[in-house]
Image (cartoon, rainbow, N blue to C red):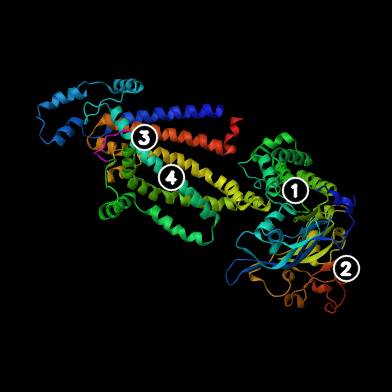
Amino acid sequence: MSPTDTSTQTSTPTPAATPSDPVLEIRNLSVDYGFGDDPTHVLREVSLTLNRGEVLGLAGESGCGKSTLAYAATRLLPPPGLITGGEVWLTGRDGKRADLLALSDAELRAARWRDIAIVFQGAMSSLNPVYRIERQLIDGILAHRPRTRRAEARERAAELLRLVGISADRLRSYPHQLSGGMRQRVMIAMALALEPQVLIMDEPTTALDVVMQRQILEQVMELRERLGFSVVLITHDVSLLVEVADRIAVMYAGEIVETAVARDVYAKPRHPYSAGLLGSFPPLHGPRRELTGIPGAPPDLSKRPPGCPFAPRCPHAMDVCRVELPVLGRTAQAEEGRLVACHLHTSGLVDGELPELLAR
Amino acid sequence: MRFLLRRVVFYALTAWAAITINFFIPRMLPGDPVTALLGRMQGRIDSGAEQSLRVLFGLDQDLGLWEQYVEYWRMLLRGDLGLSFTHFPTPVADIVNQSLPWTVGLVGVATVIAFVIGTLAGSILGWRRGTWADSLLPVATFFQAVPYFWLGLITIAVLSVNLGWFPSSGSYDRGLVPAFTGEFIGSVIYYGFLPALTVVVSSVAGWVLGMRNMMVTVSSEDYVTVAHAKGLPERQVMLGYAARNAVLPQVSSFALSLGFVVGGTLIMEMVFSYQGIGYTLYQAVSTHDYPLMQGCFLVITLAVLVANMVADLAYALLDPRTRTEDR
């Protein structure tokens, strides 16, 4: 269980370092909310691949299905959410692949935390208020490795806290005695307790101030290099992703509309929505520019019109966009490792050139 | 430590207020005990005896309210609750002493049973929300809505009068001498079964509903999802994470209901003619037996206060967040 697989790591994460080594593969995952005759399709055939050692950013507005994707992929979706189709293939440490959605309850329980751990949005509410930090760090370890001696587990808990920069005497604290940032660090320490291969972080820093956000994310990235796990980082903050992620997947209305290497998304967005999303955050480098934002609001998923869900807000919408749903495919420039779901990139449909913004 | 001290001061103040109010209430009631006694005896006491009765009861001295109040405290501190008017000259303390164990034993045990069963059932119902378990809720709501006296009378009618399985009143076989023998204890349990059953049946639904609703609320907390994500066994998540937090409000209402064990069973004791403190209080009120009334009220008040204190302590023990000012 020692972090030996860091060999694939390099200090400067190369884009898609080992594209043929997926550790988590989500295939055509669909989720509905509501059991009735008319459920809301919240995720529609989402496919996503996380490679070993990679940081995959998942970006999009609130309500686009980012968190639903994380919950569904780990089968933590609370009712009335219902997974209606798809597969989630996880490659174990031993190289065996298993579909998380097809595992029995016992197998799933064993795989959770050992292979795939989650850090949730609410730093304040993720810890059980009536137990000490120590107990909550230990119970996960003992549940998966029942033969661990208590003293050993306690030692491991102290080690984990030190890993995230908290002194070990905090073990005896209750959650309410810690600050928000410390609680989120404790959560991260807890998530790393069994050295999982995949760490899903669902807006891990939204509840924290900007300085704390940066500190915690930097710490996670540093730990990733040391321990060699892969990260799915969910956030609406694209500029943050550009800095820390290797690849970015942009979601809109329950679908992935663009995936690409992080700096390509930043420099050369191919989907009008990605471009709009980038325009809503101040640039990190270069001259100041006016923030544009995206006009309109995300669509009501229960009353989804035919065609591209972004069409009503898209400055480049064509007639076909309102009729036909675009599928994820190659870009007009036919770039390696990039996918986009937009009719502007479907050959033969565009009359003239791509809009300037999307053709850089 | 400061936390504890503050609680103690608070309870001392409350006790003082309760005892003082207890002193005034009977004095504000209309009627007087001598006339009530004469009325009850329906002329079997010569009207000339009225004056001697007044002297006997100590009602002839024309003490001011303040002197009475001071005297009341002085006697109270010696454990002297005065003499009962109706059971003259038995001391009130003796009567209370006799009836209190019956109530505490019967209703106390029944309340504990109801709490344990109700909370366990509520945890399971709450954990399995959205399944067949939800169909049990209307049943629970029904039992919670049923008036207690009706339930008691129906139980007597069916199980005691019609089927003859259990005695309909009393607390033990009158042919036995109270003693710690198997026979006597068996008889007490046999006689107590019906009243206990009705108390459990009528109160268990409240515990079930309360716990179930708290479970549903707590189950959607993030830390429960985290516990699932950690791959903890389902039982551990249900008991250690969900129920452990959901039980907190239950515990405080449980401690409070223990306080009402002493005072709140009047109807049960009347329906079953059970010789507890509620029945005694009922008799005292209907005969204007001030000292006995005061004695009963005092015991009830103190019981509620003690229960409150227990609730406070239990809560502090179970919920670390309430302990912070302690540090």
Residue type pointed to by label 1: Leu
Q: Position of residue B259 (x, y in %)?
A: 41, 37
Position of residue B38 measured from the top left corner of the image (x, y, whole percent) = 14, 33
Tell me whether circle 4 and circle 2 mark residues in contact (CB < 8 Å).
no
Q: Are dots 1 and 2 on a single chain? A: yes
Q: Which residue is label 1 attached to?
A: A194
Mark 2 residue crowding within 10 angstroms, few (<14) / some (14–19) / many (20+):
few
Image position of A183 (left or right of B15): right
Badge 4, how many Cα within 10 Å: few under 14, some, many 20+? some
Whether residue B94 is visible, yes or no, is: yes
Q: Chain of mark 2?
A: A
Q: Which residues are magenta?
A: B173-179
Is residue A202 in view?
no
* Quadrant containing the C terminus of chain B in the rendered view: top right
N-term mark: 3 or 4: 4
Q: Say which residue label 2 marks.
A: A359
Q: Residue at x 38, y 50 (%)?
A: B202
- Which chain is indicated by disc 4? B
Mark 4 and mark 1: Cα distance apart in space: 42 Å
Q: Which residue is mark 3?
A: B300
Which of discs 3 and 1 lies nearer the camera? The answer is: 1
Residue B77, above or below B300:
above
In 3D space, how far apart are the residues under numbered discs 3 and 4 (Cα atoms)? Answer: 21 Å
User: What secondary structure is found at the residue carrying circle 1?
Assistant: loop
Callout 3 amino acid: Ile
Looking at the picture, which amino acid does disc 4 mark? Ile
> Residue A218's spot in the image, x, y percent?
81, 46
Label 3 crowd bin: few (<14), some (14–19), many (20+), radius 10 Å: many
Q: Which subunit holds the residue at mark 1?
A: A
Q: What residue does disc 4 label?
A: B113
